[in-house]
Amino acid sequence: MNLIILGPQGCGKGTQAELLVKQFNLAHLEMGAALREIAKEDSPLGRRVDETINHKKELVPEKVIDAVLEKWIGQIPAEQGTIIDGAPRKISQIDEVEGAFKKNNRQLDFVIFVNIPETESVLRISKRYSCLGCQARLILGWDFQNPTDPCPECGGKVEQRPDDTPQGVRKRLEIFRQETMPVIDHYRKQGKLLDINGMQSVEKVFQEILEKMNK
Ligand code: AMP
């Protein structure tokens, strides 16, 4: 089984991808996280990716996405399924992603679209933190009470992503509307899209995904 999961910022697609990974033993590519790792590298590529994702808050060029995809997909055993979180994010990336699948004898089964309203995106992202130590995803006011508190899981330092400022989220939502919604429409026309209501508990969202996959 080969899946793609897409949705606006803060929709919970990362959490749902992790649940799908556990349920079906999938290999998981989180494109944003892979790019954030590249952005930490002290190299011309690292500096360019850092500038694009953390400062300009724009999409990185196609050739970088291509290189990440190729490197990742080539290492996965043929019998293992996959899930890609965060690509294709624009129409021109559809051929790249599907080309990488085809080259590795894989076929895309479903595109999961977890949707929430934009106001909810901004609200959720303003409370989204993660631990620099154990990488736990943490929600302010829920998992911990004060932005300066240590991680409740491991005591590590907790921080917000540099692109998770209100202005950064608005810019990324605009890109989602303009660039990624046409990708969603493309897969809806192909009959591969699973429309999922992200305004439910984590468990209910997961249940809806499983139900729609089984139909
Ligand atoms: P995310 O963690 O999914 O919010 O992604 C963080 C950032 O990484 C995005 O705002 C983009 O700058 C970049 N990014 C992630 N996925 C892609 C993609 N498929 N194409 C281009 N840029 C991407």
Image (cartoon, rainbow, N blue to C red):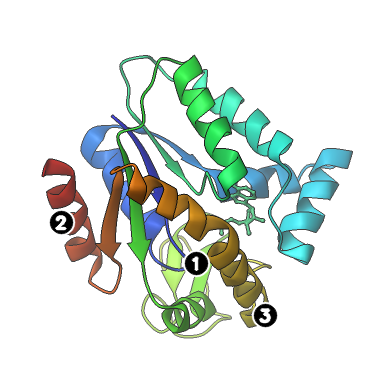
Could you tell me which secondary element the residue under label 3 belongs to?
helix
* Labelled pair 1, 3 in contact (Cβ < 8 Å): no
Whether 161 is drawn above or below 103: the answer is below
- From where the camera sits, is residue 17 visible? no
> Please, what is the three-letter code of the amino acid marked with disc 3?
Gln
The residue carrying mark 1 is 9
Could you tell me which secondary element the residue under label 1 belongs to?
loop
Whether 43 is drawn above or below 13: the answer is above
The residue carrying mark 2 is 207
Q: Which residue is drawn at the image coordinates 44% and 20% (left, top)?
A: 76
Could you tell me which secondary element the residue under label 2 belongs to?
helix
Whether 161 is drawn above or below 92: the answer is below
Ligand 1 near label 1 (Cβ, under 8 Å)?
A: yes
- From where the camera sits, is residue 25 visible? yes
Marks 3 and 2, Cα distance to the nearest angstrom?
33 Å
Q: Which residue is drawn at the image coordinates 28% and 48% (left, top)?
A: 19
